[in-house]
Every structure is written in structure tokens, then in C-alpha cells.
Amino acid sequence: MLYAGQAVSVRDAGDGLYEIVFDLAGESVNKFNQATLNELRDAVAAVREADGVKGVLFSSAKDVFVVGADITEFTGMFENGEDEIVAGILETTKIFNAVEDLPVPTVAAINGIALGGGFELCLATDYRVMSTKAKVGLPEVKLGIYPGWGGTVRLSRLIGVDNANEWVCGGSEKKAAAALKDGAVDAVVAPEMLRDAALDLLRQCIDGKFDYQARRAEKQQPVTLSQIEQMMAFESAKGVIGAQAGKHYPAPLAALATMQKHAGLTRDAALEVEARGFAKLAKTDVSRALVGIFMKDQAVKKAARKHARGAEPVKQAAVLGAGIMGGGVAYQSASRGTPILMKDINEQALQLGLDEATKLLAGQVKRGRLDAAGMAKTLTQIRPTLNYGDFGNVDLVVEAVVENPKIKKAVLAETESHLKDGAILASNTSTISITELATALEKPENFCGMHFFNPVHRMPLVEVIRGEKTSDEAVARTVAYAQAMGKTPIVVNDCPGFLVNRILFPYFAGFSLLLRDGADFRQVDKAMEGFGWPMGPAYLLDVVGIDTAYHGDEVMAQGFPDRMAHEGENVVDRMFKLERLGQKNGKGFYAYEPDRKGKPKKIFDESVFELLDGVVGERQDLDAEEIIARMMIPLCIETARCLEDGIVATPAEADMGLVYGIGFPPFRGGALYYLDEMGLDRFCEMAARYADLGPLYQPTERMKQMAANGETYYG
């Protein structure tokens, strides 16, 4: 072996060919930490100095190629000044340049995921052969930065400015067919043929059948567009990319500006432009928050793996209740490979659930993510039934009937009697106590909550709720099932509303109080959407359903009467009384009509103000800053309470629950991160100005203590 390190080795592949292999010791994936980069530098130097070398293959001994940079290690670099960041980036680009400058042809054999820095290495080679199972991409904009190791430079010259703009500024992963179509890879083959195909390509380069030097030179020269063509390509992209990114996410437009700036430069000058732009983004608050989100996501997934350790897999599932939610659960389970029974008490409901699953699968086919055969196969994994005949073979049942404790108790008790020993019952309740529901069961240790968010196929979060008597085994198996469904589970302890809804309802209470004091709901929506929420509270209530919010509010008021009960009628009560239920019946705070795609289109309804007479105050203009403060204070305080009460184990899980469950603005990092960034002392001062609004606006004693001591949630 020519070179052997802890992450990189060099093997003699015969006939003058050498293979640089990534295999990071002690890890399930390859990633670029500083040690791996140093070994790559040494391995490339060893190959360069080897006698008789004719070609070099880059490959991986793991199921992935290289997943990217080890962000947990590189965030330390972001704390440096801009000049130091630039110097560090350029040191790494020297390693990639050394790959590109080898005096022999080079090929990357991409067997699995190659993202970020992993794909930037592939771009530094002369040719790329990709497995049909692999994915490639440059997702850095999702971290508030952009590719900094030559990705913006090489890709824009390799696949053209228009394609590179979409790849870099969109940050999406690309499957093999899409990568080949755009020219980012040169061949796509079956996994078992990958290494042989890559070595064969190297031999053809050596034999002169492919001019690898011309291909290499193309990546090192300016973009082959005239000044006018460049201007048209970049300027036309600005509007589209800016609209997609939104004002809170500067990285996509910064990447576009960087690519435009270095388009007329040769490689080394272009790389310096890229590095300087990267350093500016690395110092932004947005980048720090988004990198924090990435690391918190990893922490949440690690916690879930720990909970699921040793759990028996769910081989057969069932869902009770075949409405939109039940159909969504059935679709998600079946599409991820776990067959599921879908039970209801009448044929019409079963058909509704099947229709929902069919609609979702048809959407996958339409988008090219599934073929007709795959759709048919998935539908066969969903078996509708009106009885419990096959429930003796079920490993886990998700109860998704109407949100009524008496009905849920009756259905759960009936179902339990038909299950085999050890089968798990899980309730998809959004607010009702799991401990209370368990009183109807003979084996409460096999019962927990499994709260999906609507729509099931889009929302990544599942709350797994531990009741007083829930066993570790029940939690483990439920978490494992959520993971198998492609969801991110967070384990929380039982209380009214659990984690996400317990925090959401104080936010809704802040909205009701604003309207009581004369705020226009449209003004509130505009302010909160400007803050970064995907939709304002009035619009969100319409989407959630006014009836759902009304019943949830009753549960929360009973559970936390000191701060969540309210005197008299509020706007949600009035809307419910008027049967303005939101999108589900076409009228709520807004009116709704189908757009040309059949989706509900929001329309202002002037009559709402008259209908709300008596529960809203005399109209007054409030500035956005006051609206944001009055909405965010109760939400942040309740998040802190959930952590203090042990409902959620860590700040990371609390923050990611809000990001994944209700769309808390990712660039703000989560509620507890938001408090850290503001400073608890400043937050408590701000809350004191609104203390007369009631207990929801009064920080906990622990928060005050932390403020006095200068403590933070993330240290």
C-alpha cells in the first residue's frame, strides 16, 4: 500500500493505476474533518511522487462517498475574523487544486452520497462516474453559506452558468439521472459495475480516447460566455432566486453574486473571490443560526437513535380512523415499506382514507418520483378493513379517531382486546393526556402518544409521548416506527398539549389579546410573516381549523388554568360559534376559493370585522415591533417552562420541535436560541413592559435567575 492513514489510503490498482480510498475509521460515513483533509493532501502527494503512475481513481469503502465537511469541527473556524477564514479556506482549496493538477487523468467513482465538500472533491477530478443509487449536490446555502472549496468555480464552468445557478443557489440533492443530464457527471452505471467502469474510463484516458487535459483546462478558464451573455444569465436569475430564498436568507443571492464576479477569472483568482464571499457569509447571524439548526437536528436524531436502541422493528402496523389523517398515516407507512391495516366503522370513511393515499401517491408519480408499478405496489400495502380480524398480527396500532377523550378511550379499550401480547397502542392525540387515556387500558405500559402533524406526508416531526405508566419498550418501538416512516421523532413527557401545542396555544392567546386591544388581524399576520413565520397566526388558525383550535384551547385552559384560561369570549370562540372553521369550510378569518390548481386561495373578507364586533377593540395601528413582542413573549416563556418542567429533555429538542412542528423560522434558530441571541436580561426587561397582560407574559423565576447570572440555554 502506497499510503495508509486513519481516513485515506492509497492502493495499487495495477497497470500504473492508483486508487485513493476514503474510509474514516470509527465512523459510519466519510466526512472531511481536518485530519481527513490532511491525509488527503498527503495521499495526493504520495501518488504524485510514485514511479510509473498513469491514472488515479478516487473511491470510498463505505456506503457513501463523502457526505461533506464535518460541520461540528469547522464551526470553530467561523469564529475567526474574515481574513483568517479566507486563509483557512484557501489552504483547503490548495488540496483540491493538487488533485486537479495531478499530471495524470483522475476519475471519481461516486458510489453513494457525495455532498458539499465531498462533491467539490469530485469536481476537482477530470471525470465522474456515478452509481444509480448515489446522490450528489452542494447544499451549503441551507447552512447560510455557499460552497467554499471550489464548488461555485468548477461547477459553473463544467455545467454552464444557468445550471450551476440552480444547483448552488437551490442547494438540492441530485439523483444520478439529473446529474448526468446536466453534465455534472460523465456516466451512470449500476452499483456493481461502478469501480470497473471508472477504471475503464481511466484506461481510455491513458489510451488517448478522451482528452482529459482539455477537460481540465475548461474548468480552470473563465466561463465561456460573452460579457453580455453573462449579464443576461445572472441578472435574469436574480429575481427568481431572490423570490425563492426570501429576504431572511442571504446565501443564495450572495452565491449568485460571487459566481457572477468570478465568471471572467481563471481558477486561482476565482477561488479567492469565492473564499472572500464565503467568509462574509460565515460571519452572519443567519449562518450561525442555520449551522446551529443543523447541529441540533443531528442531536435530535442521535437522541432518537438512543431511544430506539434494541427495539423490535414494526413489521405490520394498523391505523384506526380512515380520514385525512388516517389516510396520511397509511400512505406514509406503506410508502416507506411497512404494510398497514386501515380500520374504520364504515365504507365511506375507508374510501376517504384510500383516496387520500391514492392522491398522495399520484402526486409522486406526477413528479417523477415513483412509477405506476411502484404506486400499485404501495397501495397493496394498505389493507382497508371494517373489523379486527387481522389485528392479532399487528405490532403497533396508531389510533387517529376524533379528538374526544370518551370516544378515544372506548376505541382504545376495544382495540386492546384484539392485540397480541407486546403489541403497542399509540394515540395520535394532539392535546389529550396520555396518562388519562391509559386509564381505559389493561396494559397501560404498552401505550403511548404518537402525535403526527398535518399534513402527515410533509411535516417531519412526530411527538412520541410518554405517559406515567408507558414502558421504555413501548417508547423504543414507537420511535423506531417513526424513524422507519422517515420522520424525526422527539420523545416528550405527558402534559396537556405535550410540547408543541402547549407552546403554540400561548402564541394564539397573544394573538387574541392583540385583537382584543384593537389590532387588525391582517396587520398581525404581516408582522409575523415579516418576522419569518411561514404564515401569520390568523392564517395559521384557518389552516389548523378553528374547531381544532377551539377544542384545544379548552383542554389547555383546563390543564393550565392559571395562565391559559381566559374570561369571556375571544376571537376563536366567536369564529367557532359562527361556524367559520377556516379552510375546511372555506371561511375563517379569511375566505377561501380554489385556485387553478385546486388549492385554497386566501381572500380578504370585509364582513369579518362586523362579525367580530364585541370581541375586538377599537381599531388601532400597532407597529410591527410591538406585535412581534406581544406574540413571541408567551411562546418563548412557555418553551422555557417545558424545559424546566421536564416535558422535553434538551434545548435542542425543544427548538427543533418548534421548527419542525409549527414552522418556527429556522434562521432564528428556535425559541431558546432566540432568547440566547437576545439575552435573557433584555427579554425579561421587554416582558416586564407587558406584565399587565397576565401570567403568560411573566418569565419564570428560573429565567429571571438565569438573566441575573448571565446564563444561556446553549452555553
Image: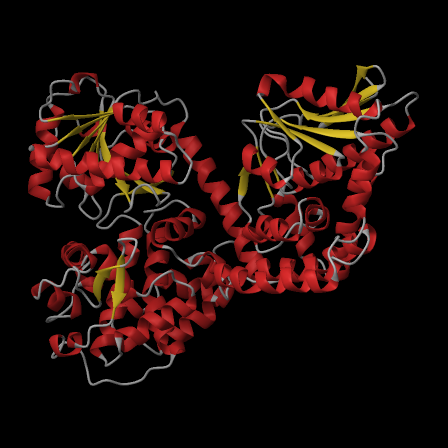
Tell me residue 173's x, y (percent).
54, 41
In the image, taking residue 450 as reference, residue 44 lies left or right, namely right
Task: Give the farthest residue toward the top.
Answer: 14
Tell me residue 122's x, y (percent).
70, 36
| Residue at the image point whose x is 85% and y is 38% from the top | 101
The number of discs equals 0
Q: Quadrant of residue 594?
A: bottom left
Question: On the rendered image, what quadrant is the N terminus found in?
Answer: top right
In the image, taking residue 668 as reference, residue 690 lies left or right, namely left
Tell me residue 492's x, y (percent).
32, 42
Q: Along the line of sight, which residue is nearer the eye, 679 or 590?
A: 590
Residue 65 vertical placement versus 290 (above, below)? above
Q: Along the line of sight, which residue is nearer the eye, 658 or 172?
A: 172
Q: Along the line of sight, which residue is nearer the eye, 672 or 519?
A: 519
Residue 243 vertical placement versus 441 (above, below)? below
Q: How is the image coloured?
A: secondary structure
Residue 665 seen in this snapshot: yes
Residue 712 seen in this snapshot: no
| Residue at the image point whose x is 26% and y is 69% from the top | 511
Tell me residue 610's x, y (percent).
13, 79
| Residue at the image point whose x is 61% and y is 55% from the top | 145
Residue 465 vertical placement versus 28 (above, below)? below
Q: Quadrant of residue 694?
A: bottom left
Residue 587 vertical placement versus 206 (above, below)? below
Q: Quadrant of residue 467?
A: top left
